[in-house]
Image (tube, rainbow, N blue to C red):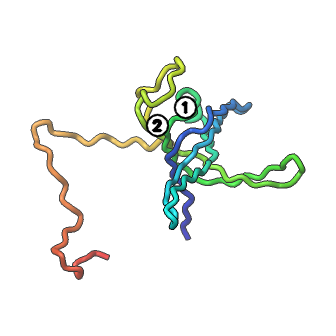
Amino acid sequence: MASLNKVIIIGNVGNDPDVRYLDGGSVVAKFSVATNERYTTRSGEQVESTEWFRVEVWNDQAKTIEKYVRKGQQIYVEGRLKTETYMDKEGKERFSLNVRATTFQFLGGPNDRQDDGSEQPQPVRQQAAPAPAKPAPARQQSAPAQQPAPAFESNGNDDDLPF
């Protein structure tokens, strides 16, 4: 049976990334992301709820996070949930639910970032695991752009639906 562990978060970075260079050459960046939800209760009261997520990013992606991400920036994070166990100060075993990011994208423009005098990221917008190289399709410069034919056209009759 197939399984899926995937989470998508869009929120604001809660702290500057904590980046560590490990002995084996690996790099890990850890930071938090806050998401907000606003809703109205039955009594008409406006409520805002914030959820915090711990995010970790590895290797080349961690280096990009170190260079460009700062507290307050809006970010898109895609990854998987990972449970970690640790011992607290009293010696009790505790659990932490973290997001191990596989893809992220900076949201907003350079003007939305804090101006601390550091170099602002311009070309880097998204980092993901490398995909296999595919040859680019050949294009004819003189041919007009054509819309692809829809995979299914309905005449309004529900009996024609493909599912």
Query: Is there any visible trace of residue 128 in the rendered image?
Result: no
Q: Nearer the viewer, residue 123 or 40?
A: 40
Q: In the visual, does 68 lie left or right of 142?
A: right
Instruction: Tell me which residue sits at (65%, 36%) in the image.
Output: 28
Give the residue at x 19% y 55%.
148
Above or below residue 7? Residue 71 is above
To which quarter of the image does residue 71 belong? top right
Residue 151: x and y in percent read 24, 64
In the image, what residue occupies the spot 26% across and 42% down? Answer: 137
- Horizontal and vertical percent for residue 142? 10, 37
Residues under labels 2 and 1: Cα distance? 8 Å
Asked if marks 2 and 1 touch (Cβ < 8 Å), the reply is yes
Residue receiving disc 2: 106
Q: Specify the quadrant that holds the C terminus.
A: bottom left
Residue type, mark 2 in image: Phe
Q: Nearer the viewer, residue 139 or 36?
A: 36
- Which residue is denoted by mark 1 in the rendering? 69
* Total numbered labels: 2
Of the numbered discs 2 and 1, the one sitting upstream in the chain is 1
Would you say residue 53 is visible in this rendering?
A: yes
